Amino acid sequence: MVTTRGPDSAAEILDALTEDERDVVEAVARAVLGMRAATNHTWREIAGRLVDDGWEVRSRVAWVAEARRGAVHETAVADSREAAFAQLLDMTVADAVEGCP
């Protein structure tokens, strides 16, 4: 059996990743840090309250792509970066078709 040794340090691990993989790692790290932020109520408490009030609730990590030109602002949310930017492109093209600069 042949085994290869992997990277030893966090820096070596990051160096071994592609740019897209590094972006995903950064997004996950930001999400973890965001979950640690102090609030009056945890997300579980809030979700429980909503369920108790008859709401079906779910959450997920998603990519957000935003475009701004002057006072015009578009935001797209999707499961992948590619899908978010494709949606954002559709939104900005629709603005141009409707006569926006």
Image (cartoon, grey):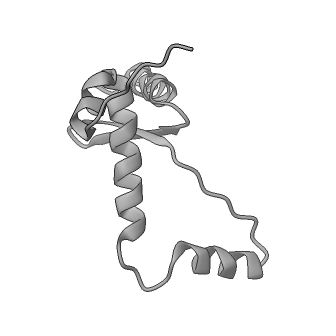
Q: Is residue 17 visible?
A: yes
50 in relation to 99, above or below:
below
Residue 90 shown left or right of residue 74 in the figure:
right
10 in relation to 40, above or below:
above
- In which image quadrant can residue 25 be found? top left
Q: Residue furthest front?
A: 1
- Which residue is pictured at 74% across the width and 75% down the height? 51
The quarter of the image holding the C terminus is top left
- Which residue is pictured at 49% across the width and 83% down the height? 41
- Which residue is pictured at 40% across the width and 36% down the height? 24
Q: Is residue 53 visible?
A: no
93 in relation to 47, above or below:
above
Query: Residue 94: where, in percent of width, then height?
Result: 46, 24
Q: Residue furthest right?
A: 54
Most foreground residue, 38 or 1: 1
Residue 11 shown left or right of residue 65 in the figure:
left
Most foreground residue, 67 or 23: 23
Most foreground residue, 26 or 84: 26
Query: Residue 71: where, in percent of width, then height?
Result: 24, 43
- In which image quadrant can residue 95 be found? top left
- Which residue is pictured at 36% across the width and 78% down the height? 38
Q: Residue furthest top?
A: 2
Query: Residue 68: where, in percent of width, then height?
Result: 27, 37
